[in-house]
Image (tube, rainbow, N blue to C red):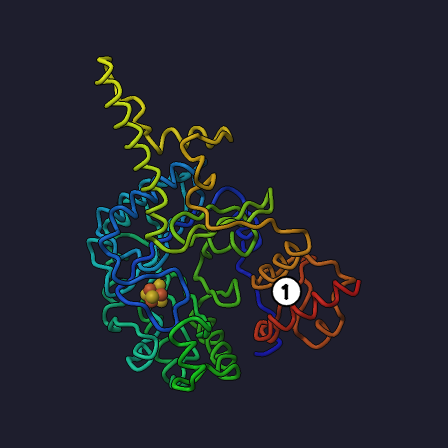
Amino acid sequence: MRGQKNTPLPDDIWWATRAARGLGVYVHVPFCERRCGYCDFAAFAGLDELMESYVDTVILEIQTRVHAPASTLFVGGGTPSRLPPHLLRKLLCAVPKEAGAEVTVEMNPESASPAVIAAAAEGGATRLSFGMQSVRPKVLAFLDRSHSPRAVEEAVSSARSAGLAVNLDLIYGTPGESRQDWAASLEAALHCSPDHLSCYALTVEAPTALGKAVANGTKSAPQDDVCADRLVETTACLAKAGFTRYEISNWAREQPCRHNLRYWSHGAYVGVGCGAHSFDPVRSVRRWNVRHPMTYVERISACVRRSDTAKNAMQTASSRSGSSFSGDVSLNLPKNFSKDSQRGRKENFWEDLAEDPWEGGHEVLHDKILAEERLMLGLRRVCGTVVPVDRVPSFLVEEGFCFWSEARLRLTEKGMLMAGEIVTELLLSFERW
Ligand code: SF4
């Protein structure tokens, strides 16, 4: 098994290159029932009252920043399935999409009601991604997940009835999870007949509740060798079940997730919503939005308030002067700003804010960083990436970590267990060159 060469999906390279073209849109929905201890995403509990104004603000941002139909759309979170069905539908409908676009919505099994799933389908969703994580209650409890294994089956069945493809997300390596527990989770996932599976090792991020618990010794950390064993078992189990691996942690029956291939291929994407990242490969700019949903909504509310104040002042002035006031300066934010921003002009309206009121920051990626990222992301794909042959240390191939195919460097299964170390070796070699 170890050292075995991975075979890409038949059209893997085609997908990887095609997915990088066109525009991808990521929409972030930050609302969660509660914050899971291991979660490092922009996810917030107790803010459900903000949902309506948040969705309106996201739609404004879409109208302002998404200037072409999306070939892939991914609505993630947080928990998008916590939105009321009418808001989820409204959000999905607001994104312009190419014909045949891949549209994914992330859902948690406990909130993926038939009504929410129907709303996703009406909004143009083509696939749903459910956070199953595990079938074992003790593992779900460690992860602070509240759904029952039965809820996953019901949600998948509703997705099927709505004609949608299904991905299941699983997490392995949770402390206390045995080999048998993980095998049971894989078996339960396969029992649902998903089209796609994403299996990731549990990672511990320092600022999370789990990170703090591990640091103070009240919880154990996942063990690298156990995670490596689980990954090997997963690969064997899913190959037997007819799945093809196309990325270190992702398997598909037929079609890979085109949106995620875009990330791994350095394709263009616009991220909208709090904390969302965007990447412009032409200008090599990565940009991210403010992280907290209240700040995100407040930034635009401040503009609207100024708009209303300006409008009220003009109405007052016009009534004092006896002239009529048409109200035309009501500043329809989406329309005006969208038009002007497309022309590259800055509206006076925004002048005391950052040019883009949602932006939390941005960076221009220099060639060296871009090359490193391309290597790291590209090697995650089974189809690999293009690397100058003479810069690859020969032992990586001779010792079975990598192999060449169609002028691309690819990781073997053994290499996939040590992808981080291999990338480090390659980068050191590039620096010596
Ligand atoms: S449900 Fe998902 S996004 Fe929300 S807190 Fe848990 S892991 Fe994070």
Q: Residues within 10 Å of mark 1 (few under 14, many from 20)?
A: many
In this view, 340 is above or below 18:
above
In this view, 113 is above or below 37:
above
Residue at numbered disc 1? 410
Residue 307 lies, in percent from the top left, at: 32, 32
**What is the quadrant of the C terminus in the image?**
bottom right
- In the depicted view, which residue is nearer to us: 354 or 2? 354
In this view, 361 is above or below 356:
below
Residue 215 lies, in percent from the top left, at: 45, 81
Q: Describe residue 83's horizontal placement relative to residue 186 as left or right.
A: left
- In the depicted view, which residue is nearer to us: 193 or 185? 185
In this view, 25 is above or below 368:
above
Residue 259 lies, in percent from the top left, at: 46, 52
**Label 1 lies in ligand 1 vicinity (Cβ under 8 Å):** no
Q: Which residue is farthest top?
A: 323
Q: Where on the picture, by quarter, is residue 42? A: bottom left
Residue 78 lies, in percent from the top left, at: 34, 60
Ligand 1 shows up in the quarter that is bottom left
Instruction: Report the residue at 46% width, 46% height from top.
Output: 270
- In the depicted view, which residue is nearer to us: 297 or 138? 297
Instruction: Report the residue at 26% width, 20% height from top.
Output: 317
Q: Exactly how many numbered labels are in the figure?
A: 1
Secondary structure of residue under mark 1: strand
Q: Which amino acid does label 1 sit on?
A: Arg
Q: Is residue 270 visible?
A: yes
